[in-house]
Image: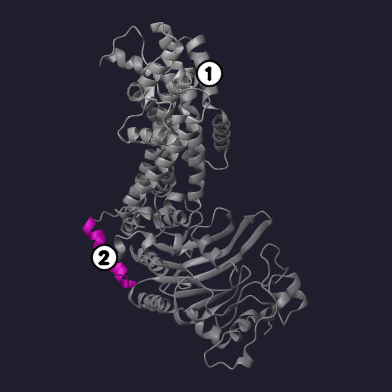
């Protein structure tokens, strides 16, 4: 297993009337082949920005400032439009969060499959197209006969979400990136999708990266978790280690705020304070105003993402200079 | 099918209400509708005016002792038989005038609208794709200015520039008086030459408004999630522009296209009278000037029918092309 994606110092902002939203502030992480990585964080912490910047699909007001995204030694951010277009979906597929409006309202589902196939120069006959599309739709537990010839308005939200996933699987990409794949779904469909992603992970040669605010989903699916706070990765480690031994004060807070079904209510502690505005983020470590271990250096200097001896990565001054 | 029937019934009610309104309005206009015809009869046949009035009323089928309600009943029953009334000024049935003038109006309006729609769609889509550039600014500003110019002012300008000063376009009529109508190239080219002025006056403001509408729709559609998702899937820009942006942006305009043609039937009056073009609008303005109430009522009714038919067609065209309507 080698590295498939290496993100280096990715910086992206959104231009709004009030200023610039610093949504990705120097993101670096590695993704191994055939692994599952979860990007976890609160709403508006910049999780989606990371994957949108990686695939150059930021909204119109988004700007990529710097960084490199190496996919098999190719820098995605340096490719020209046509080179990138050929990689998109065939090798790296991204299922966006806005599943509800992501299908063309005046086209049948099958035509979305057809356009996708044609865009990548694959010459399937109508019969082959129907066969491949049906196979993928069955994988997401949809009835192909009912769905293929339907218009988007005839599908429910969960069905649309699953159509997008089926579309993403159509060309059997190496990397599948999903933005909040379960958040729009009811609990039953959610568990279907999680089950499906688990099966995918086992059966296909596929690298999954997904964004979620639901740490339980991340725990169930992921091999590694990247914890995002206010546009920074604060901790990146294996699921097991992150749950057993969270390092960053924010991760610790996150873990102790999870409610298990048999949890002792008195032990659940919310993190004090509110997440910061990304328009005017705090100086130094962006978590310092809420941190119980805050030191003088935290207010001035942004902590780098350190790699500790056991491979854990954490961005916190508590662990720098022989600390811990 | 249920939808079809309810739609037809609805439009029938609209038709009856609108036509009744016209009837009431025209019948409450000051003056005797037979007076105009009576004067010309009195002059031609050298009879006293009283006698001429009687003759005129006879020709027009008006009984002064009839109640308004009886007249209304007669008017409506005639209408449903396809009889639009009688023109005192032209001394002939309104049906005859319609059959003589409607083809010219439809010829000009439909060509002008079709042409301006196509041009406007492409200009608008182009402007939207050049969002934020000087090109977009130029197209939008020019369109806003041109859209604000009333067609009749444009008509006067065109007439003055091309017919009076440059003398490249004729001064009036649908074809030259000295040419016999035939299916020859010469005659047909003359028809187009005579229609060019009215067509330009009608088309130019329309191009501007289609451009603005299309630009608005297109920039709205371009921000939709399904456009981004198409880009994410690696679709070519040309495919996205055609199947995802343009098709969705044009849909609402197709409906306004049909409605627009209907409304233009009435709105074309001033342009036709400026160019002396013998369409519906030309006779309409003559009817107003000559106080020809019969012709006025008949043409009004025709315009109402035009608008209603256009609405009806627009509904069905829309249902035909937009799955979101079709499936409801």
Does A139 lie within the magenta span? yes
Residue reaching furthest to the front:
B65
Question: Which part of the image, by quadrant, shows the N terminus of chain A?
Answer: bottom left
Residue B156's label in the rendered image is 1
Q: Nearer the viewer, residue A193 or A189?
A: A189
Q: Position of residue A155 (x, y in %)?
A: 37, 65
SS label for mark 2: helix
Q: Residue at x 33, y 16 (%)?
A: B189
Report the mark closest to the observer, 1 or 2.
1
* Callout 1 touching callout 2 (CB < 8 Å): no
The foreground one among B183 and A176 is: B183
Counting from the top left corner in percent of width and height, residue B234 is at: 40, 55
> Cα distance, mark 1 to mark 2?
61 Å
Q: Main secondary structure of the magenta part?
A: helix
Residue B168 can be seen, yes or no: no
Q: Residue at x 52, y 90 (%)?
A: A261
Instruction: Tell me which chain the residue with mark 2 is part of.
Output: A
Q: Residues within 10 Å of mark 2 (few under 14, many from 20)?
A: few
Instruction: Look at the numbered disc 1 and give the secondary structure of its residue.
Output: helix
Q: Can you say whether A45 is above or below B200 in the image?
A: below
The residue labelled by disc 2 is A145
């Amino acid at each position: 297993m080698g590295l498939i994606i290496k993100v280096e110092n990715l910086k992206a902002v959104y231009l709004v009337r009030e200023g610039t939203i610093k949504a990705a502030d120097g993101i670096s992480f590695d993704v191994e082949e055939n692994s599952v990585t979860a990007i976890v964080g609160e709403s508006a912490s910049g999780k989606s920005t990371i994957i949108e910047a990686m695939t150059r699909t930021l909204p119109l007001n988004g700007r990529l400032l710097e960084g490199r995204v190496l996919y098999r030694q190719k820098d995605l951010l340096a490719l020209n439009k046509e080179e990138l277009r050929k990689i998109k979906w065939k090798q790296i597929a991204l299922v966006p969060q806005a599943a509800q409006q992501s299908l063309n309202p005046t086209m049948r589902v099958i035509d979305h499959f057809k356009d996708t196939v044609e865009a990548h120069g694959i010459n399937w006959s109508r019969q082959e197209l129907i066969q491949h599309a049906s196979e993928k739709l069955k994988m997401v537990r949809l009835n192909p006969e009912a769905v293929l010839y339907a218009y988007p308005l005839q599908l429910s939200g969960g069905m649309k979400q699953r159509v997008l996933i089926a579309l993403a699987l159509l060309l059997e990409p190496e990397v599948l990136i999903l933005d909040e794949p379960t958040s729009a779904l009811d609990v039953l469909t959610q568990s279907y999708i999680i089950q499906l992603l688990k099966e995918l992970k086992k059966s296909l040669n596929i690298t999954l990266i997904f964004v979620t605010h639901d740490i339980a989903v991340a725990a169930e699916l992921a091999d590694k978790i990247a914890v995002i706070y206010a546009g920074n990765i604060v901790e990146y480690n294996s699921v097991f280690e992150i749950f057993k031994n969270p390092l960053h004060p924010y991760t610790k807070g996150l873990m102790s705020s999870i409610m298990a079904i048999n949890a002792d209510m008195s032990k659940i502690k919310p993190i004090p304070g509110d997440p910061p505005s990304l328009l005017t983020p705090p100086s130094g470590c962006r978590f310092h105003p809420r941190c119980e271990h805050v030191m003088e250096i935290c207010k001035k200097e942004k902590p780098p993402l350190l790699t500790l001896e056991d491979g854990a990565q954490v961005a916190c001054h508590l662990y720098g200079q022989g600390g811990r | 099918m249920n939808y079809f029937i309810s739609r037809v019934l609805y439009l029938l009610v609209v038709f009856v209400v609108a036509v009744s309104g016209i009837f009431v309005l025209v019948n409450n206009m000051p003056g005797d509708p037979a007076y105009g015809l009576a004067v010309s009869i009195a002059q031609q046949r050298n009879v006293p005016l009283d006698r001429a009035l009687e003759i005129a009323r006879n020709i027009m089928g008006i009984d002064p002792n009839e109640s308004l309600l009886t007249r209304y009943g007669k008017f409506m029953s005639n209408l449903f038989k396809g009889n639009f009334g009688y023109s005192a000024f032209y001394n002939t049935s309104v049906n005859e005038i319609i059959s003589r003038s409607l083809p010219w109006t439809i010829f000009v309006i439909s060509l002008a609208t079709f042409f301006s729609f196509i041009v406007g769609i492409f200009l608008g889509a182009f402007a939207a794709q050049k969002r934020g550039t000087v090109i977009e600014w130029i197209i939008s500003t020019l369109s806003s200015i041109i859209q604000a110019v009333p067609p009749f002012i444009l008509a006067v300008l065109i007439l003055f520039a091309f017919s009076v000063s440059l003398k490249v376009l004729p001064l009036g009529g649908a074809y030259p008086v000295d040419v016999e109508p035939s299916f020859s190239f010469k005659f047909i080219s003359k028809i187009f030459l005579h229609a060019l002025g009215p067509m330009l006056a009608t088309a130019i403001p329309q191009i501007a408004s289609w451009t603005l509408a299309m630009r608005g729709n297109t920039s709205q559609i371009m921000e939709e999630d399904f456009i981004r998702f198409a880009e994410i899937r690696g679709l070519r820009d040309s495919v996205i522009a055609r199947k995802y942006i343009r098709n969705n942006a044009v849909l609402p305009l197709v409906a306004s296209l049909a409605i627009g043609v209907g409304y233009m039937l009435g709105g074309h009056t001033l342009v036709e009278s400026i160019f002396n073009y013998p369409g519906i609008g030309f006779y309409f303005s003559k009817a107003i000037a000559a106080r020809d109430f019969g012709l006025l009522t008949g043409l009004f009714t025709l315009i109402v029918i035009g608008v209603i038919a256009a609405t009806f067609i627009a509904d069905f065209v829309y249902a035909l092309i937009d799955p979101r309507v079709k499936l409801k």
